[in-house]
Amino acid sequence: MSNITVWTKQHENVLKELETTGRYIAKREYIRMDLKEQAPVVLEAYDWLVKHGPDRANKPADVEYPVWVSFTNEGTMMNSENTVILELSLDPAIITSVNIAKWGHILNYGYIPKDENDLRRHRQLLEDYGISDVKAVISQFYPQIKREIQNSWERLFDDTILMGSDAKYGNVWELRREWLTDVIR
């Protein structure tokens, strides 16, 4: 299969690292610096993604987190100060597709239902306890509900389950200089 073009918005230091070393990998410290007080919430979701992603067996030992890529140039968002958009040519086999809407649920500690009946059942469960998904996940008082919510995240990779949109981003374990086809500043 031939390569496809994808884009990723990155801090300009990522480009410098690519040019200098030929490779970039995402590290926990970079996410902490970028997201500041939101980092613990996002890192919990990223930890789950790394542990449960379908391509986890191919993760290089020195990689901590995947790098996000967009299948459309518009999906990278507007370029901002100190960032660049890297255009890459990649073998689609190394990209793990991630449904954007379902990933948003995971970032918000939300439940990903199998279907409408499952959604109603889950909402009733939360109502019976007088809690939200977030409260169930962050507190220590609802371990069974927390487990149900986190187990539902496995549906992230099930393309038969949709939540509003089938739009996707992709994940790759690293960026390599030889994949770079253009830099948009």
Image (cartoon, grey):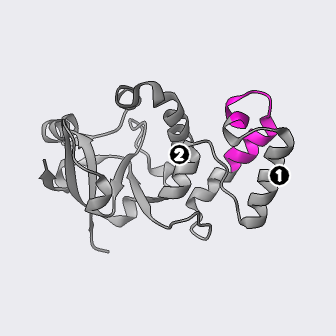
- In depth, the one of 149 and 16 nearer the eye is 149
Q: Is residue 68 visible?
A: yes
Q: Name the amino acid type tagged 1.
A: Gln
The magenta-colored residue range is: 135-151
Q: Is residue 120 left or right of residue 12?
A: right
- In depth, the one of 164 and 97 nearer the eye is 164
Residue 35 rendering spot, x and y as whole percentages: 40, 31
Kind of element beneath mark 2: helix
Distance of mark 2 from mark 1, alpha carbons? 27 Å
Q: Is residue 121 above or below residue 35?
A: below
Residue 127 rendering spot, x and y as whole percentages: 81, 45
Q: Label 2 belongs to which residue? A: 49
Q: Name the amino acid type tagged 2.
A: Leu
For marks 2 and 1, the one nearer the N-term is 2
Q: Give the label on residue 182, or none.
A: none
Residue drawn at the location 82% of the way across and 51% of the way down:
124
- Camera-near label (2 vs 1) is 1
Q: Main secondary structure of the magenta part?
A: helix
Residue drawn at the location 73% of the way across and 36% of the way down:
136
- In depth, the one of 17 and 100 nearer the eye is 100
Q: Is residue 21 left or right of residue 166?
A: left
Tally of numbered tags = 2
Residue at the farthest bottom position: 1
Q: Is residue 53 visible?
A: no
Residue drawn at the location 83% of the way across and 48% of the way down:
125
Residue at the farthest right position: 128
Q: Label 1 belongs to which residue? A: 124
Q: Is residue 78 above or below residue 146?
A: below
Residue drawn at the location 52% of the way across and 57% of the way down:
101
